[in-house]
Image (tube, coloured by chain):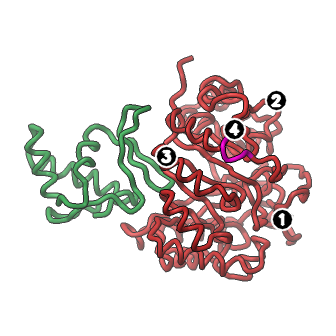
Chain colours: A green, B red
Amino acid sequence: MSGGDDETVPALARGVKFRFDEVRQAWVLLAPERLFVPDEQAVEILKLVDGIRSLGAIVDELTGRFKAPRDLIARDVATMLGDLADKGAVKL
Amino acid sequence: MSAPAPPMGLLAELTHRCPLQCPYCSNPLELERAAGELDTATWLRVLDEAAGLGVLQVHFSGGEPTARRDLPALVRRAAERQLYSNLITSGVLLDERLLADLVEAGLDHVQLSFQDVDTANAERIGGMVGAQAKKRAAAALIQQAALPLTLNFVIHRQNADHLPAMIALGAELGAERIEVAHVQYYGWGLVNRDVLLPSRDQLEAATAEVEAARVRFKGRMVIDYVTPDYYAQRPKACMGGWGRRFINVTPAGKVLPCHAAETLPGLTFPSVHDESLAAIWQSSPAFEHYRGTDWMAEPCRSCDRREIDWGGCRCQALALTGDAGNTDPACALSPHHQTMQAAIAAADHATDAGFVYRRIGASRPVEA
């Protein structure tokens, strides 16, 4: 896992698009010759990946919204984004 | 039966025309001539129908898709319909003006092929003198335009030893992704199997190189690797399963579950002239035929991997066993699996007879 610290600003990699698909009624992450249909939790994280917010700010935002300990959310966010970074869809 | 989930990708084979003549081309042996190609208006309608059906990505392919003058117009329509557009090109026809038009139209990504890093060998394989310089120029233009780039290397006995330099070229040209794909032995690849099938040593060296490079370039460049079925124990989920993820439209407008499906006997493939993509996807007999698992015989029928590999490739089953309904012989459980070992032995002992290049009228039948 390639995590990144609180100051890291994650962004979608070049050529990657995150959009809502009306046919499936689902969010999809479209990348060069691959695509992902993220689960609900991943969708909430990806909606906050805008190339401006830091990892810390994303975790703060989610902690305020969901009733879970901050370090647990931080771990989930780092795992999910680290996995997408390994697949080339996110830059950390 | 409930309606199948919508396809993820449309393979739009715009033309079979191509300045290159690669002896492993994935096009059928019977190539479509320019006069038989769909017109612009029909392709635009196909893109609209694809988006309505739930297609998310469109792969503009060929032949050489940039041989079609209407490519920017098709890319623009894809962008308008929020279809993620991917151009699969050899790069030899790509100039500054065309690339600018494609960028302006909203092209999302380019996959650029190289036949080798060694110029003489690359041009021998592709059958086109001067191609390598044009490809390098195309790569530079793509880099300047800041378009996401994948370099594609199809590897085989005649170039696999150059893989380290191929991966280095990807890094040099700023690719974020490299696709290293062993030849798949259908159609033209099958005709040329004896001169293309790698040795086991070559395969193992290539696999080790890919694994080492993935570690080296982690976080900077993704390396996708397509292995050759002939050394496999289990088949690939060809196209992610018949009629599950991809819909393919040929230059003439036939709609197929995979680009090679026209080789299968007894199936009538519908045309975009006669029915909508949705009707074809959801209920045409050709798409229903090998969809799911009901069609399977043993050893697939009772296998716990039947919804992982979906029985492998129908075209390979036909070519090597004579029956498209058999288990793909790439599977070690197939009673025909030894045909693959026999082919490897034949290739290891073959004298280099040269290529049968992909040209209209060049194919000759082979006994598999």
Residue underneath mark 2: B266
The amino acid marked with disc number 2 is: Gly
* Mark 3, secondary structure of its residue: loop
Q: Secondary structure at mark 4?
A: strand
User: Real-space Cα distance between discs 4 and 3?
Assistant: 20 Å
The chain identifier of the residue carrying mark 2 reads B
Q: Nearer the viewer, mark 2 or mark 3?
A: 3
- Discs 4 and 3 carry the same chain letter: yes
Distance (Cα) linking label 4 and label 1: 25 Å
Q: Which percent across, then down, holds residue B98?
A: 59, 67
Left or right: where A17 falls relative to B207: left
Q: Is residue B170 left or right of residue B298?
A: left
What chain does mark 3 sit on?
B
Q: Residue placed at 69% from the left, 82% from the top?
A: B119
B131 vs B29, nearest the viewer:
B131
The kind of residue tagged 4 is Leu
Q: Quadrant of the N terminus of chain B?
A: top right
Magenta segment, prevailing SS (helix, strand or loop): helix
Q: Indicate the quadrant where residue B200 lies.
A: bottom right
- Check if mark 3 and mark 1 are on a common chain: yes
Name the residue that disc number 3 marks.
Answer: B83
- State the residue position of label 1: B357
**Disc 2 versus disc 4: distance between alpha carbons?**
14 Å
Alpha carbon distance from label 2 to label 3 = 33 Å
Asked which secondary structure carries label 1, the reply is loop
Q: Is residue A49 magenta?
A: no
